[in-house]
């Protein structure tokens, strides 16, 4: 597929919303409201209205006095078929089909989807959906999601894009990242993937200059070989985080060989993920954590040597345990570093690895520890217990400075309470430092970041 | 040596979905996979069975060949480690007797006599034509460990050498291959060659749906497939 084909789904100049309405319970209402941020021209279509929210409303897409780059259909499934002819006559070549009730809903739905597919091919219309939320583009405000912004806030502009087979997961990821102030470039949910699929989206994002990394949620792929090729190509250019859910679905057909029995559903997906160079995540929390890491952190982790800096011993022990599980090593400070740290710090600080600046540690001690030690390591986990009298929220800037000066990945572990710590977390995120609420999650996110950027380094 | 296509054609013409073990072994031999020395002898010809065992050299393995038997061990159709001609002569009637109890419908056409191989690390090397991902291979601990440890992982073909090594690194089998405590490193190159041979079979013969080499015994030098199973489309 030509990548420019997906481009006009994300950057149309004009959008027709078929099924626009003012009825608050209908998807056509939420989408119309969400399109208010879109920088292009929006044309509502519904024969029952002359006007909707101050915009002229058209009885058919044929009546619109403008060329239409993208149509969004938010009508019940049974009305979709006859709209295809109108789109064909109007010369529309991109369609987002929100409507549900197709191949996911029994035989009649399957037949309808097939007829829509034939019509789309006949008229040269590329389709996202059906049974899909469509696209979100923070760059131009295009938003075909039928969830209101009062309920689900949208993230700011950023470098992470999301590909999700599930609409629910797309929305929840978006909101979870928005809550932490993590920016998003684009989101696509392709539902029943009548046409546009996982591989098409990866191909597009691989060359999209706004997209710096992608998080993918899949239950299945449209075409295994096509997906592997697209994922491999993507991961050779940008970090790719991938969550394959539905791991324990087993084939209903009895098979005679061990090989086929063991493959099940997940065995081959795991192979595809390994061979693509994507970093696999295990579930929801891991997905959010890894998405946050690749969205914020741009420094590759080129080795296994992990440094831990803490002002509380126990948390560092937990982080070190997780580091072992994740394949990190924790070498001790080499002699010159050890000497320097002993010289800089009071004698009761622990100047091995983890470096423990204790409950007396000050903001600038974090900076000193990171500045001196990071050159000897590949990455650092910084544990910040904000309850001590000697650490203030200004520590966030010092940790961020040390990270950006060393150009090595640093993630923080900070328990996220209310008020003060919540604000300190926001300061860290604003400076591009991922923050996690537990030492295990911080280390795991760092390991996933390392994996996601590993193929880029190899090649 | 017969051409793989001819071996498959015979099974297809007889309406079989699976190859006999000796056919599967001939198939995998044709792409360079090493199997123990073996011979197939008609079930009625006791003299020839004993003479063949002498030629192959004791200890030997005796396996009954029957189109009705897919799982030999369960049907009592396998006897390992037969030390001499006296033991072999006694094993034949005992095995037929056992089969008549456990698989009453089975007709034993012939016996497969094989050289017993020394102990070694047992691997599973498999091939699969998947509807989604196409030709794929599997790799992991084999023999009795297949079910117990579920060590096997998969790879989607075609694969580079690096991808094959990455795949093997994910398994316990891969760790054992590299040598472990007092055991020396085993012949990783022979294992890679066997996986590449399986992938060649899948590419050259679209009729093959599934293929198991299990166990493959790996030594400091060489790897030998003790059993082979091939399922056709």
Image: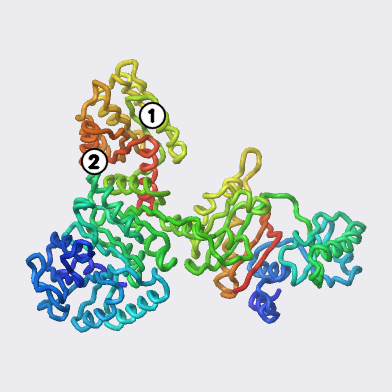
Give how far across and how far down residue A75 sits, in percent: 25, 71
| Chain hosting mark 2 | A
Disc 1 is placed on an element classified as helix
Q: How many numbered marks have been drawn onto this rendered protein structure?
A: 2
| Chain hosting mark 1 | A
Residue at 52 percent across and 50 percent down: it is B170
Q: Which residue has dot 1 on it?
A: A316
- Where, quadrant-wise, is the C terminus of chain A in this rendering? bottom left
Give the answer, above or below, for where A82 lies relative to B82. below
Q: Residues within 10 Å of mark 1 (few under 14, many from 20)?
A: many
Give how far across and how far down residue A215 sits, in percent: 33, 54
Q: Residues within 10 Å of mark 2 (few under 14, many from 20)?
A: many
Query: Whole-Å distance between the Cαs marked 1 and 2?
Result: 21 Å
Q: Which residue has dot 2 on it?
A: A429
Query: A418 or A401, which is in the foreground?
Result: A418
Colour scheme in use? rainbow
Residue at 34 percent across and 72 percent down: it is A195
> Image check: A86 left or right of A281?
left
* Residue reaching furthest to the top: A347
Residue at 58 percent across and 51 percent down: it is B151
Give how far across and how far down residue A182 sits, in percent: 24, 47
Is residue B162 among what the camera can see? no
> Image check: A4 left or right of A281?
left
């Amino acid at each position: 597929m030509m990548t420019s084909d997906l481009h006009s789904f994300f950057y149309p100049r004009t959008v027709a919303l078929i099924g626009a309405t003012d009825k608050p319970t209908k998807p056509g209402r939420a989408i119309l409201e969400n399109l208010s941020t879109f920088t292009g021209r929006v044309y509502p279509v519904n024969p029952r209205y002359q006007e909707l929210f101050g915009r002229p409303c058209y009885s058919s897409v044929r009546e619109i006095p403008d060329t239409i780059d993208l149509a969004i259909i938010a009508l019940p499934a049974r009305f979709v078929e006859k709209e295809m002819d109108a789109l064909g006559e109007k010369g529309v070549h991109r369609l987002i089909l929100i409507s549900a009730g197709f191949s996911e809903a029994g035989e009649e739905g399957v037949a309808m989807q097939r007829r829509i597919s034939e019509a789309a091919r006949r008229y040269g219309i590329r389709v996202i959906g059906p049974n899909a939320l469509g696209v979100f583009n923070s760059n131009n405000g295009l938003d075909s999601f039928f969830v209101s912004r009062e309920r689900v806030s949208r993230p700011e502009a950023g470098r992470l894009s999301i590909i999700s087979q599930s609409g629910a997961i797309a929305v929840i990821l978006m909101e979870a990242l928005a809550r932490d102030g993590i920016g998003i470039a684009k989101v696509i949910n392709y539902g029943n993937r009548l046409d546009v699929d996982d591989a098409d989206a990866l191909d597009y994002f691989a060359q999209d200059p706004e997209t710096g990394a992608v998080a993918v949620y899949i239950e299945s792929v449209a075409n295994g070989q096509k997906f592997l090729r697209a994922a491999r190509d993507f991961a050779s250019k940008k970090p790719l985080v991938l969550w394959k859910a539905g791991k324990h679905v087993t084939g209903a057909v009895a098979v005679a060989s061990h090989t086929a029995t063991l493959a099940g559903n997940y065995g081959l997906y795991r192979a595809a993920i390994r061979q693509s160079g994507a970093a696999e995540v295990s579930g929801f929390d891991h997905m959010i954590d890894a998405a946050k890491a690749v969205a914020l952190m741009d420094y590759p982790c080129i080795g296994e040597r992990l440094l831990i800096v803490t002002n509380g011993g126990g948390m560092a022990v937990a982080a070190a345990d997780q580091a072992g599980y994740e394949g990190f090593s924790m070498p001790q400070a080499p002699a010159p570093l050890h000497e320097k740290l002993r010289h800089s710090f009071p004698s009761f600080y622990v100047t091995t690895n983890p470096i423990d600046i204790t409950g007396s540690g000050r903001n600038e001690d974090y900076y000193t520890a990171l500045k001196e030690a990071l050159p000897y390591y590949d990455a650092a986990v910084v544990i910040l217990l904000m309850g001590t009298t000697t650490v203030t929220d200004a520590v966030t800037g010092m940790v961020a400075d040390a990270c950006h000066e060393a150009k090595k990945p640093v993630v923080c572990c900070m328990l996220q309470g209310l008020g003060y710590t919540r604000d300190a977390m926001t300061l860290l995120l604003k400076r591009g430092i991922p923050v996690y609420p537990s030492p295990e999650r911080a280390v795991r996110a760092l390991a996933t970041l390392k994996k996601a950027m590993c193929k880029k380094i190899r090649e | 040596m017969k051409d793989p296509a001819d071996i498959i054609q015979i099974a297809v013409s007889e309406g079989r979905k699976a190859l006999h073990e000796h056919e599967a072994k001939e198939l995998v031999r044709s792409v360079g996979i090493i199997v123990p020395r073996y011979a197939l002898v008609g079930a009625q010809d006791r003299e020839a069975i004993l003479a063949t065992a002498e030629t192959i050299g004791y200890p030997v393995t005796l396996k009954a060949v029957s189109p009705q038997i897919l799982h030999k061990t369960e049907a009592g159709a396998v006897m390992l480690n037969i030390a001499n001609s006296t033991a072999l002569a006694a094993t034949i009637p005992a095995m037929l007797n056992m089969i008549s109890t456990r698989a009453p419908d089975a007709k034993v056409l012939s016996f497969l006599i094989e050289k017993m191989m020394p102990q070694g690390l047992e691997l599973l090397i498999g091939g699969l034509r998947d509807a989604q991902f196409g030709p794929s291979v599997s790799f992991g601990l084999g023999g009795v460990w297949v079910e117990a440890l579920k060590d096997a992982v998969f790879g989607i073909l075609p694969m580079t050498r690096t991808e094959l090594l990455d795949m093997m690194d994910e398994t316990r089998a891969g760790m054992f291959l590299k040598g472990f405590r007092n055991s020396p490193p085993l012949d990783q190159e022979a294992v890679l060659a066997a996986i590449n041979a399986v992938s060649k079979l899948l590419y050259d013969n679209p009729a093959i749906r599934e293929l198991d080499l299990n166990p493959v015994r790996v030594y400091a030098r060489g790897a030998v497939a003790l059993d082979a199973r091939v399922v056709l489309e």
